Amino acid sequence: MTSPMPYDSGFTATNFAGFSLSVDLVGGDKNLGANWQSLQMGDTTLGAQDASAGGYQLSRFQLIGQLEYGNVTLSRPWTPNQSGWIPEWFALAQQYGGTTVGIAVNYLDPTGTLQQATYNFRNAYPVTWTQPQFTTVTGTETPPVITESITFSHSGYYDTDGLAAGIDTAEAVQPCKLVILPGGSGASTGIASALAALTSWTLPTTAALGISLNSVTAQAVGMLGPFPSITFWVPPKTMNVTKTANWTVDPSPTASGSGPASWNGTDPTQLSFEFILDGANSDLNYSESSATSGQALGNGPAGQSVLPTAEQLLSLCEVELMSELVGYGSSPLVVFVWGDFISPVSYVTSINLNFTRFNSGGQPIRAEGTIQLQQYPVYDALQNPTSGGEMPRKSELVHEADTLAHVAYRSYRTPSRWRDVAAANDIDDPLRVKPGRKLLIPAPEELPSRTETGLVKPSAQSASLSRMRNPSTSKKPPGLSK
């Protein structure tokens, strides 16, 4: 950008000497014809939103939003055989996406020397073509000037001569994807356990261990790299995170406020967000540099069906084949990744998907929807971090105001295992456990299966042995005599 000339009081405005247009996507005539005479560059707006704050009368608080670029409009007198290139730009943009548009503005500086300022627009799309209006006139009337105009949108500038340095820096967007972990769930797999240690959203505690948060994030991203994933066209506008804790309050007529509260554990984290799948241009809008700015941001032609990706999304709510073959059929586990934002290891609870655009062959080329994830509980405290095997029996100290449910939750991540802790320590009254007592905690593989009411489920092997020892208790097929 050239330095401005010294101020001249007799030079009040730039002497505009015309401009030239170049639309890279149009091969026949990049200028879309000739005789463009008017140029409106549009406004650049920082979408700030006022935040309501009580008690302030003279202060204004604003939430900074997205940088928005206004549309650019060019107009000219209509000339025969010039307008045909404009609808061609519309057709090519629909097929190949955005393009680079360059406008060179010619002007005279205060010395009368012809100068030129170049504006290059990234990712430009034609928006409106205002076609000429023809009106017949009589011989005595002055014929009106017949004009036409073209308006296009864009997403900023690059390599621009007429703007200050920095405003034309290309934006690089990280990929937004849903990584699918191998092996499904059913049991805490080694991969899920390792990732859960890095994506449990308890990362601030790593500061006390002297571990950098960035290094932990980088380690998690590195582990997720080789796995299959679903990449969304744009990152979600909002991400809803829900976390709840379970407390039981016992009514007490003598309490001034409420009865005593008992901690019953925490519910899994839930995440939900809206997504867009777009086959009309691309679903990979994450790499853009000044060398490729304005070109199609995609990997496929227009009309590419999004049905395979939609089916892949819906399959996240179905039984995974590999997990079914090994005997514990379940849906896959996933991790949502966008840059440094890494969700916990989760499973998909619901997908709501709408096809909103189709091509001429009836294939859906755009889909919008909502997906909801729920954190998968992986018991890392129960795993040997080096071998993946179960740890031996350990002990827990009973603290003041502790119950066996508290001890069970700290040991197994569920308070319902208090009966097993009581049985392992010969406790007859679970409500009378003195603080300071050290309790023996059974290993997870030693825990019996229980019903919802807490009764121990007999295993298939023990039930078979019982029938062998007491054949009279076995059921006989109907119709046979005793």
Image: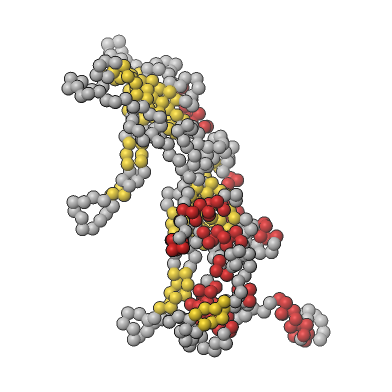
**Coloring scheme used:** secondary structure
The residue closer to the viewer here, 348 or 209, is 209
Residue at 62%, 56% (x, y): give it.
Answer: 182
The residue positioned farthest toward the front in the image shown:
210
Q: Quadrant of the N terminus?
A: top left
| Vertical order, 388 against 435 (above or below) | above
Residue at 58%, 41% (x, y): give it.
Answer: 305
Task: Give coordinates of residue 245: x percent, y percent.
Answer: 44, 69
Asked where in the image residue 475 lies, by quadrant, the reply is bottom right
Residue at 55%, 73% (x, y): give it.
Answer: 412
| Vertical order, 332 against 433 (above or below) | above
**One can see residue 294 in this view:** yes
The residue positioned farthest toward the top in the image shown:
139
Residue at 32%, 19% (x, y): give it.
Answer: 115
Task: Give coordinates of residue 445: x percent, y percent.
Answer: 63, 73
Task: Give coordinates of residue 342: x percent, y percent.
Answer: 49, 54
**One can see residue 431 in this view:** no
Q: Quadrant of the C terminus?
A: bottom right
25 on left or right of 133: right
Task: Give coordinates of residue 11: x percent, y percent.
Answer: 20, 20
The residue positioned farthest toward the right in the image shown:
481
Asked where in the image residue 254 lies, by quadrant, the reply is bottom left
Asked where in the image residue 113 lies, by quadrant, the reply is top left
| Vertical order, 118 against 184 (above or below) | above
The residue positioned farthest toward the bottom in the image shown:
428
| Vertical order, 1 against 319 (above or below) | above
